[in-house]
Image: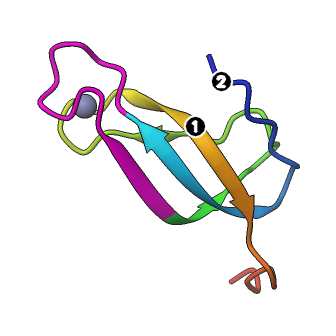
Amino acid sequence: MSDITLEPRTFYTVVARDVTEDCPNSGGEFKVPELYSNAGTDASVSCGLCKQPMQIVAAERLEPQPEMP
Ligand SMILES: [Zn+2]
C-alpha cells in the first residue's frame, strides 16, 4: 500500500494522500505534523471525511523527537 518505511516507535511529520475514489478529498494531500509510528508497520492516517486510511506519500523523522507523554 505504501513504500514509505517508518522506524518503530518514532514520531514523523508525514504527508498523506486520500486514495478513496468517491471521497471529496480524493487525490488531496494532507500534512500531519506529528504521527507516531507504533510498530513501524501499522502507522496510519485516516481521512476525516471518509474515515478510510490514507496513503502515506512522504515522511520525515521529527528532530528532536518529542517526549513521550
Ligand atoms: Zn477521504
Considering every residue shown, the one lying at the far right of the view is: 7
Q: Where 14 sits versus 28, above or below?
A: below
Label at residue 57: 1
25 left or right of 12?
A: left
Coloration mode: rainbow
Q: Residue at x 47, y 42 (%)?
A: 16
The image quadrant where one finds ligand 1 is top left
Say which amino acid is labelled 1.
Val
Quadrant of the drawing holding the C terminus: bottom right
Q: How many marks?
A: 2
Magenta stretch holds residue 26: yes
The first of marks 2 and 1 along the sequence is 2
Q: Circle 2 sits in a helix, a strand or a loop, which is it?
A: loop
Pointer 2 with pointer 1, Cβ within 8 A? yes
Q: Where 23 sits versus 40, above or below?
A: above
Q: Where 29 sits versus 21, above or below?
A: below
Label at residue 29: none
Q: Whole-Å distance between the Cαs marked 2 and 1? A: 7 Å
**Mark 2 — residue?**
2
Magenta range: 18-32
Main secondary-structure element of the magenta-colored stretch: loop
54 left or right of 52?
A: right
